Image (cartoon, rainbow, N blue to C red):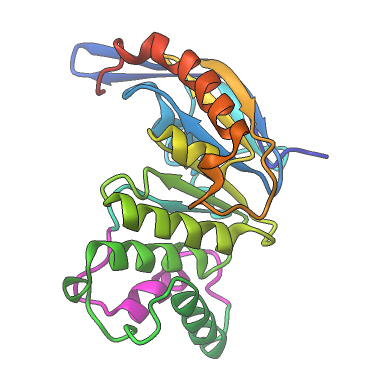
Amino acid sequence: MQPILDFRSVSKVFYKGDTRVHALSNVTTRVEPGELLAIVGPSGCGKSTLLNLTAGLMEPGVGEVLYQGKPISGVNTHVSYVTQRDNLLPWRTVEANVLLPFELGPRSNVSSSERRDRARKYIELVGLKGFEKHYPAELSGGMRKRAQLARSLVYEPDVLLMDEPFGALDAQLRLMLQAELLKTWEGSGKTLILVTHDLTEAISLADRVIVMSARPGRIRTVQRIELPRPRDVFTIRFVPEFGEYFENLWAALREDMHQGAEV
């Protein structure tokens, strides 16, 4: 099967004035269609850079990134990107925010009635039914994250990119939204790439976990997570295999933790 994403010997260097920051070095990996891939590593190791390359927001300095066998050139309109900040437009209601991708993205030919139907579907799916006419300022942090997720799903992208989507939330709300995410993703056939600092989150959700080294980011190890699906994020951490996966991943990660630094 052809991978949906193919990173081939990718390196990336940034320049800040006279400072040269080597973010990625010789990263090679494939992402299969329908896979849920988690990427972990110390701060500044290039995790978000991998997502930006996938979205076509930047180009690799060396190597190439292929989407369905073709090099990504310009903005990749087949992916949706959930950033760390929700970026909801404060002057638009939840419904209007969720509908925004149809005004900007590749699905502009979708009829008005289908747009509204999809918006209602995903607003209900993330648990915001009844809040369609509320503005972001009237929502809690968790509800804003739910609205952001609905907005990312509404035009039904092939690939969903998520950059620390739940990192700023309290532990209970984070678990609830992880459960919502799994319920949305499982059986959808969509590909999901999740950047996280949380090993427990990575193991609970992913089919595979990539551990990046300290900058310049390289792939230190890849761990396949062979826990049965569907998964219950509230109980999965108590199965014996979970602890084994955690120990293996932490052993790879802790070697570089003291070297991690923000870019």
Question: Bounds of the magenta span?
Answer: 87-109
- Give yes or no for residue 95 being in the magenta stretch: yes
Q: As drawn, is 2 to the left or to the right of 72?
A: right
Q: Eyeballing the image, is 99 above or below 180?
A: below
Q: Is residue 185 at all visible to an observer of this figure?
A: yes
Q: As drawn, is 183 to the left or to the right of 172?
A: right
Q: Eyeballing the image, is 32 above or below 149?
A: above
User: What is the total number of numbered labels drawn onto the structure image?
Assistant: 0
Name the residue located 26 percent from the left edge and 51 percent from the top edge. 170
Name the residue located 66 percent from the left edge and 55 percent from the top edge. 230
Name the residue located 29 percent from the left edge and 11 percent from the top edge. 258
Where residue 222 appears, x then y in whole percent?
A: 61, 22
Toward the right, the furthest residue is: 1
Q: As drawn, is 200 to the left or to the right of 215?
A: right
Where residue 4 appears, x then y in whole percent?
A: 69, 42
Q: Quadrant of residue 22?
A: top left
Where residue 226 appears, x then y in whole percent?
A: 69, 36
Q: As drawn, is 8 to the left or to the right of 119?
A: right
Q: Observer-nearest residue: 170 or 98? A: 170
Q: Quadrant of the N terminus?
A: top right
